[in-house]
Amino acid sequence: MIKTQEVKFNPIGVVHTPSKMGGRKTRQSKFSNIKGKIEIYNEYAEGLKDLELFEYIICITYFHLVKPPISLLSTTPWDNDLHGIFAIRSPLRPNPIGFSILKLEKIEKNSLFVDNLDIADGTPVLDLKPFIPDIDNRETEKVGWIKDKL
């Protein structure tokens, strides 16, 4: 086995939301109507310049409440079949990294007010990116095992 180097991240902020369970309560941000706030730490606030010009943002988080998976196979809410952890969107992953597309309502100083939260309160934010439909959307005919389940 090839040994890899350790990877470390420093959060740039934290999520504030009434949801204590995040993804367990709301499975995907598209289906959530939970509003909240992302507080960006002061030393990163300058990086928010021009982000308010976008309607949606991509928020990358660290699932701090998740314990490492016992298995690399898991079931989903859509069926009882075992699927590889990399073929599903469970937060129970070897590296519990979250990816949410959130509606950006406004920015006040270092606080982003957002909708569609599927993230638990207190979750560390690792990065933010603008959602750009012409770049981020893809037309596809191949949707794997989830075809006809949504």
Image: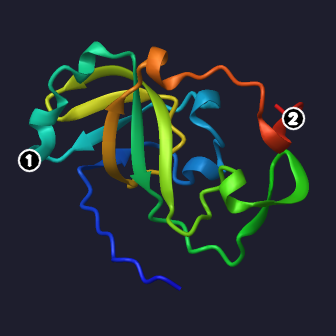
Percent position of residue 149, x then y: 87, 35
Q: Is there CB contact under 8 Å for labels 1 and 2? A: no
| Viewer-closest of 3 and 31 | 3
Give x and y (percent) for residue 63. 47, 59
Q: Amino acid at mark 2?
A: Lys
| Colour setup of the view | rainbow
24 above or below 138?
A: below
Q: Secondary structure at mark 2?
A: loop
Q: Quadrant of the C terminus?
A: top right
Q: Amino acid at mark 1?
A: Glu
Which residue is denoted by mark 2 in the rendering? Answer: 149
Residue 21: image quadrant is: bottom right
Q: Is residue 94 left or right of residue 86?
A: left
Question: Which of disc 2 and disc 1 is earlier in sequence?
Answer: 1
Q: CA distance from mark 1 to mark 2?
A: 44 Å
Q: Which mark is residue 43?
A: 1
**Residue at 77% of width from left, 64% of height from top?**
74
Q: Is residue 135 above or below residue 77?
A: above
* Horizontal and vertical percent position of residue 33: 57, 27
Give the SS element for disc 1.
helix
Q: In the picture, residue 4 is in which quadrant? A: bottom left
Task: State the residue in front, 92 or 37.
Answer: 92
- Front residue of this view, candidates 115 and 60: 60
Observer-side mark, 1 or 2, equals 2
Dot 1 alpha-carbon crowd within 10 angstroms: few under 14, some 14 to 19, many 20 or more: few
Residue 60 sits above or below residue 74 on the image: above
Q: Position of residue 11 (x, y in %)?
A: 26, 56
